[in-house]
């Protein structure tokens, strides 16, 4: 929205000048911290030495800013100011009148996703990339070791990514693919395998990524393997099989023996990487009979996927370390503490941590952030 009508802008300014909460930057921030929908404003409010300057600097921000979850923030703020004002106070009537006028024009505003500025999108993507750096250091180290061990051989690697629900397994895979040089710019083939009971179903799904044909179901695995190795002549190829905890008993063992190991037997590439991730969001697969390598030096690796350290809660020191960096680069409000994130995320459950960081930054984990991370 490009500003307010002049008359309404003047009314906003006059009404807000009368509000005690605008006496100082500190008092206004304290007021916003006490209201869920207003907390993201703490990161956006400009400082000023007096009430008039505070309004002049921040009213344009309030007019333009929309929160993904709570919508246009100016009427939300006005309503919050009204609700803490005694109903017999003249300011209550002024704020109520202003709130009604803002509500009337609010319905004519463009939806948030259509009006998000380019700078806001860039800022949000920077936040997305930074969030990927929170912990998971142990898992990344194991993957690096496995890739390095294969660098002088046929470049093949396979991993079981696992942990309890909401512990960030998919986000961990995104981090590895975006930050490890050996996996960057690779062709990613993501297939949910929940409900699959036969490896032929998997071959058919893989074939769809290489062959444009109505006869895919009739293609033998040998032909699909040929297409896979044609791809590997020019680029890395990364299979990401999700929902592996929802497959039928025995399917994963067949996947390894009848899909993955035949690829290894035929492999003759040395310039690109062939990688497979099995993603378990329940922490159940490693307790089954699936064949796994528990150490990168085992002779069974990489014919068997490497058991990575399970995704776990983020510890306080890792959150504090990340926050120090994020605050220094002005990506998150400086008043967020690691203790608060830990307390509000059931002791550091990764996806709850992500949600809280987005909440304090005026973004949404359920919106663009989660979609960007797991695309």
Image (tube, rainbow, N blue to C red):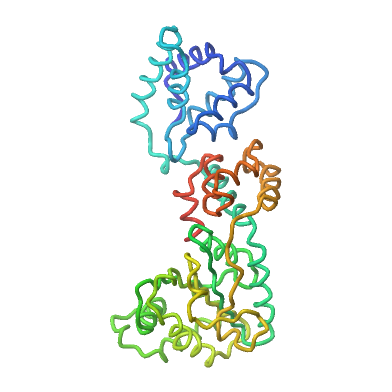
For the point 65% across and 69% down, which residue is it?
Answer: 181
Relative to residue 180, is residue 241 drawn left or right? left
Relative to residue 174, is residue 220 drawn left or right? left
Q: Percent position (x, y) of residue 196?
A: 35, 76
Closer to the camera in the image, 22 or 222: 22
Q: Percent position (x, y) of residue 111?
A: 38, 39
Residue extending farthest to the front is 287
Q: Quadrant of residue 153?
A: bottom right
For the point 37% across and 19% down, which residue is it?
Answer: 101
Q: Percent position (x, y) of residue 327?
A: 68, 42
Task: Kindly tell me whether residue 235 is visible in this rendering.
Answer: no
Q: Quadrant of residue 92?
A: top left
Q: Percent position (x, y) of residue 160?
A: 54, 73
Closer to the camera in the image, 62 or 191: 191
Relative to 275, does residue 332 appear above or below in the rendering? above
Task: Kindly tell me whether residue 374 is visible in this rendering.
Answer: yes
Relative to 81, does residue 270 appear above or below in the rendering? below
Residue extending farthest to the left is 214
- Is the N terminus in the top left, top right, bottom left or bottom right quadrant? top left
Relative to residue 167, is residue 198 drawn left or right? left
Closer to the camera in the image, 78 or 284: 284
């Amino acid at each position: 929205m490009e500003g307010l009508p002049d008359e309404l802008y003047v009314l906003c300014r006059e009404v807000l000048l009368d509000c005690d909460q605008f006496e100082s930057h500190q008092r206004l921030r304290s007021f916003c911290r006490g209201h869920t929908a207003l907390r993201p404003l703490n990161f956006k409010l400009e400082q000023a030495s007096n009430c008039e300057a505070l309004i002049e600097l921040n009213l344009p921000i309030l007019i333009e800013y929309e929160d993904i979850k709570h919508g246009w923030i100016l009427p939300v703020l006005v309503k919050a100011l009204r609700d803490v004002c005694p109903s017999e106070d003249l300011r209550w009537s002024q704020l109520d009148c202003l709130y009604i006028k803002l509500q009337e024009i609010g319905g004519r505003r463009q939806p948030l996703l259509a009006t998000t500025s380019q700078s806001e999108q860039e800022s949000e993507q920077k936040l997305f990339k930074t969030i990927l750096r929170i912990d998971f250091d142990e898992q990344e180290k194991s993957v690096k070791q496995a890739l390095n061990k294969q660098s002088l051989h046929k470049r093949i690697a396979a991993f079981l990514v696992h942990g309890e629900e909401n512990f960030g397994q998919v986000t961990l895979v995104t981090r590895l693919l975006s930050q490890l040089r050996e996996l960057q710019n690779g062709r990613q083939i993501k297939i949910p395998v929940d409900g699959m009971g036969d490896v032929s179903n998997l071959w058919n799904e893989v074939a769809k990524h290489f062959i444009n044909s109505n006869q895919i179901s009739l293609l033998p695995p040998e032909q699909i393997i040929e297409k896979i190795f044609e791809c590997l002549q020019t680029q890395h190829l990364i299979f990401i099989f999700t929902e592996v905890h929802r497959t039928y008993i025995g399917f994963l063992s067949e996947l390894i023996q009848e899909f993955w190991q035949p690829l290894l037997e035929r492999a003759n590439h040395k310039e690109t990487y062939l990688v497979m991730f099995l993603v378990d969001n329940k922490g159940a697969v490693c307790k089954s009979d699936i064949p796994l390598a528990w150490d990168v030096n085992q002779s069974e690796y990489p014919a068997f996927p490497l058991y990575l350290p399970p995704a776990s809660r983020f510890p306080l020191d890792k959150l504090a370390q990340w926050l120090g960096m994020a605050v220094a680069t002005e990506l998150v409000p400086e008043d967020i503490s690691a203790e608060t994130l830990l307390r509000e995320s059931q002791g550091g459950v990764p996806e709850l941590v992500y949600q809280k960081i987005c909440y304090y930054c005026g973004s949404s984990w359920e919106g663009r952030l989660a979609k960007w991370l797991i695309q």
